[in-house]
Amino acid sequence: MVYDIDVLRSFYTSYATKVETARKKLGRPLTLAEKVLYAHLYDETSLADFSRGADYVNFRPDRVAMQDATAQMALLQFMNAGKNAVAVPSTVHCDHLIQAYQGAGSDLPVALEANCEVYAFLKSVASKYGIGFWKPGAGIIHQVVLENYAFPGGMMVGTDSHTPNAGGLGMIAVGVGGADAVDVMTGMEWELKMPKLIGVKLTGKLNGWAAPKDVILKLAGLLTVKGATNAIIEYFGEGTASLSATGKATICNMGAEVGATTSIFPFDRNMADYLSATGREEIAELAARNAAELQADPEVAAHPEAYYDRIIEIDLSTLEPYINGPFTPDAACTLSEFAEKVKKNGYPRRMEVGLIGSCTNSSYQDLSRAASLARQVKAKGLKMAAPLIINPGSEQVYCTSLRDGMIADFQAVGAVIMTNACGPCIGQWKRVTDDPTRANSIVTSFNRNFAKRADGNPNTHAFVASPEMAMALAIAGDLCFNPMTDTLLNEQGEPVRLDAPEGDTLPKKGFTVDDNGYVAPAADGSTLEVTIHPESQRLQKLAPFAPWDGKDLTDMPLLIKTQGKCTTDHISMAGPWLRFRGHLQNISDNMLMGAVNAFNGKTNCVLNQLDGTYDAVSAVAKAYKAQGIPSIVVAEENYGEGSSREHAAMEPRFLNVRVILAKSFARIHETNLKKQGMLALTFKDKQDYDKVREDDRISVKGLEHFTPGQPLEVIVKHTDGTIDTFEALHTYNDMQIGWFKAGSALNTFVK
Ligand code: F3S
């Protein structure tokens, strides 16, 4: 047993009472998200009808999950917190650092050797502080969490932006930076702005080629990448009950792509079946007994417009498959319109690789439906036109799929079965290609498709779709193929049509696994030593950031004015840089290397105002830092979109960038900046972005009176002697202003 059932029993004993107390105090019916939130207040006496999108509220999550790339920095911070053990159940999952190349058999040993220092560090810290450790190859964090830890009505935080995957089992699960995770692991309150609520009503039932993924791909088109920022997406309506738990998880997972704080589904039979199939019958029973409080109150369902800030309705019965991309997950397109879009935009029509996996779509059901298409290849005399790569979500999914013949089905059509890990989803793909400078197209079942994300190649056009659609297009090798209407010529020259995919939501013979990859912590870790070699290139002890010196930030040289999308991948690239996630100094060399300089259209090429030369962003920042000069970054909309990696905030902080002035921020990244003692400011008038010139010196005034809700003054001195002055807004509350003054949030509670 990897979790403590007594903790769960005690949770459900008090859950319904807490919900009832909140309903009485607020004097109105509650949505499901509100029930779970109010049942997790850090201080029950603080209960009030919090203003959504405005009030900061302190919560007490039940769990923490960390993946290996972000866990390193989170645990380095936790080690500085002076605790003997974590205050809530926590786990580490080794999934990000394994490169996909020739298949699991050879890739995993290579990864074990290449990352042995980091794995040993994570395992020893986990053991010392009472944290569960999932070894490399055990699976992708969110699939493993769904199989073992998620439970209806619970709340967790995870140091990965797709933590909301657990909403598929009715949990409020939120992606956070490592510093937030440290707060929870030390037993402190976890602060979150009370989210707004977007209600998505599902009616009807999926059929044919439509998959759960298509619900969120459609929604991404409707909401765009920032449309659900600071909001929880709550699904309701009779259509929810037709979706499996893993299908629901897919939908919740990709809520991250529209900026949602998290997404959640109401408890139902399918969740209970999944809990039972994964060995958690008792939790299924406990949840069933509390079923009324694991969904919105009946009045909410009857009059949703009175309780949600926005309502969207999707009819599953008429939902078409979607293919989104390239370069952004909200470029939504229905299958029937996709061929036209490809031709009109001149996207490379040849489909070069199909990839099935990622935390979004690597469940037994996902593989089962895709395998039904693989079987048709042989049965209909077809040949695969494009290579196929499969990353199962967990060792349990892999072993069960192997037993049930699905792995053999994939291998029969030449698929390479990679390790149960993130692999190509996070740039850990040693792709073999004839010419990396050639524009090319791939279709994946992943969640993100930013430029360079899968293979590091800016010429790769990545499209996201359901696993079955990625499979169908790999069979055809043609982006313009519509499996619902088009035929393919088989080896006999006959036109054949693919039948709609089918598969099992859960394995008929139950799940099976020999070694699930879990390593329990030491019963008493107090005598265990965690060693970090001072010469290590992978790990480095953290030194606290310096507190604010009490003065305004004056005449900061502009480091870079970024143009267009600037995601966490642009700020702190993944792929080969993942190996430095535990070494702040080394990883800072990648700072903003993917961001486009608005003045020359180039990446990683910015003006050094000290000598007039152009150099890499990190090199110029280091030059300023060496002279004791703070610098500033100016950016456009949704700065920091994407992952929860706090390196994107810590690297600028480490290199003495003090301010990010943007048109808007992505939620997790804005919090990460605040936690690391940075100033995250937004233009009051977005057109002021245009006033910033390449060789400007910029001051931020008014910090002495830094107050919630009060703008700060920005003074931009141009080299021609002219000056522009304008206001910048911020969302800092008193506590967050304290973090800025102390130098970081961690500095405020480590004495
Ligand atoms: Fe891993 Fe990709 Fe998910 S990196 S956690 S599979 S988004």
Image: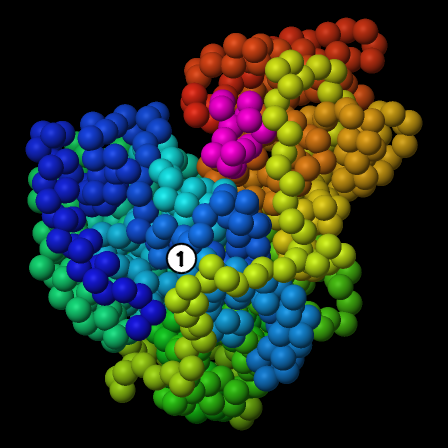
Percent across and percent down for residue 420 are 50, 74
Q: Is residue 508 magenta?
A: no
Q: Residues within 10 Å of mark 1 (few under 14, many from 20)?
A: many
Q: Is residue 533 above or below residue 749?
A: below
Q: In the figure, 510 relative to 178: above or below? A: below
Give the quadrant of the N terminus. bottom left
Q: Which secondary structure type mostly characterizes the magenta part of the structure?
A: helix
Q: Reply above or below: 26 against 423.
A: above
In this orientation, which residue lies closer to the viewer: 715 or 244? 715
Residue visible at 38% across and 83% down?
513
Q: State which region is magenta.
A: 737-751
Colour scheme in use? rainbow
Closer to us: 183 or 221? 183
| Residue for badge 1 | 90
Quarter of the rendering containing residue 72: bottom right
Question: Is residue 26 at all visible to an observer of this figure?
Answer: yes
In percent of width and height, residue 742 lies at 55, 26
Circle count: 1
Q: Nearer the viewer, residue 549 or 311?
A: 549
Q: Position of residue 672 (x, y in %)?
A: 52, 38
Q: Residue shown at 30%/29% (left/top)?
A: 52
Q: Secondary structure at mark 1?
A: strand
